[in-house]
Image (cartoon, rainbow, N blue to C red):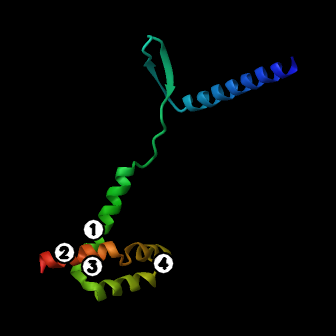
């Protein structure tokens, strides 16, 4: 008889935990949906990130395109000279130098730009 009680207590505890999690999720927002049987059920809304992935991807592509354009127009030695001078500056300039360092993707795009432009 005791084993049945602990089983029921465990089931009850799991159900309470599940409801608490759902309540916590619904505190961030919810929406009403109707099931096939006509019952209206509240479902928690998904939390969207502060910055959408599309914005991050477009920013990354923009930085790579900008680097490739600069590398193409300045040439590798002129570009590296500017990166080295940024590396000698403040911490913000050093971070900029790290972001703007020559990478294989930018180098390949710059080579294609050189073929088209010159």
Asked if 78 appears above or below 91 in the picture, the reply is below
The residue where tag 1 is placed is 65
Q: Quadrant of the C terminus?
A: bottom left
- Disc 2 element: helix
Say which of marks 2 and 3 sits in front. Answer: 2
Query: Which residue carries the number 4 mark?
Result: 90
The image's mark for residue 71 is: 3
Tell me the mark number nearer the camera, choosing from 1 and 4: 1
| First along the sequence among labels 1 and 2 | 1
* For marks 1 and 4 on the same chain, the one whose residue lies earlier in the sequence: 1
Q: CA distance from mark 2 to mark 3?
A: 10 Å
Dots 4, 3 in contact, CB < 8 A: no
Q: Residue furthest right?
A: 2
Q: The N terminus appears in which quarter of the rendering? A: top right
With 21 as the anchor, is 74 left or right in this view? left
Q: CA distance from mark 3 to mark 1?
A: 10 Å
Percent x, y for residue 87?
44, 82
**Mark 2 packing: few (<14 Cα in 10 Å), some, or many (20+)?**
some
Look at the numbered discs 3 and 1 and tell me whether their residues touch, using CB distance below 8 Å.
no
Task: Pick the residue in front: 75 or 109.
Answer: 109
Residue visible at 30% across and 63% down?
62
Residue 40, x across and y down, in percent:
47, 14
Real-space Cα distance between discs 4 and 3? 23 Å
CB under 8 Å between discs 2 and 3: no
Residue located at (25% from left, 72% from top): 109
Q: Which residue is mark 2?
A: 113
Q: Quadrant of residue 60?
A: bottom left
């Amino acid at each position: 008889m005791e084993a049945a009680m602990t089983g029921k207590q465990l089931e009850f505890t799991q159900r309470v935990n599940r409801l608490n999690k759902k309540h916590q999720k619904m505190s961030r927002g919810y929406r009403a949906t109707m099931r096939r049987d006509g019952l209206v059920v509240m479902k928690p809304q998904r939390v969207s990130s502060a910055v959408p992935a599309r914005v991050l991807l477009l920013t990354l592509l923009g930085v790579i395109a900008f680097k490739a354009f600069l590398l193409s127009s300045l040439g590798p030695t002129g570009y590296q000279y500017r990166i080295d001078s940024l590396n000698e500056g403040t911490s913000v300039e050093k971070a900029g130098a790290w972001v703007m360092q020559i990478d294989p993707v930018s180098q390949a795009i710059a080579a294609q730009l050189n073929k088209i432009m010159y």
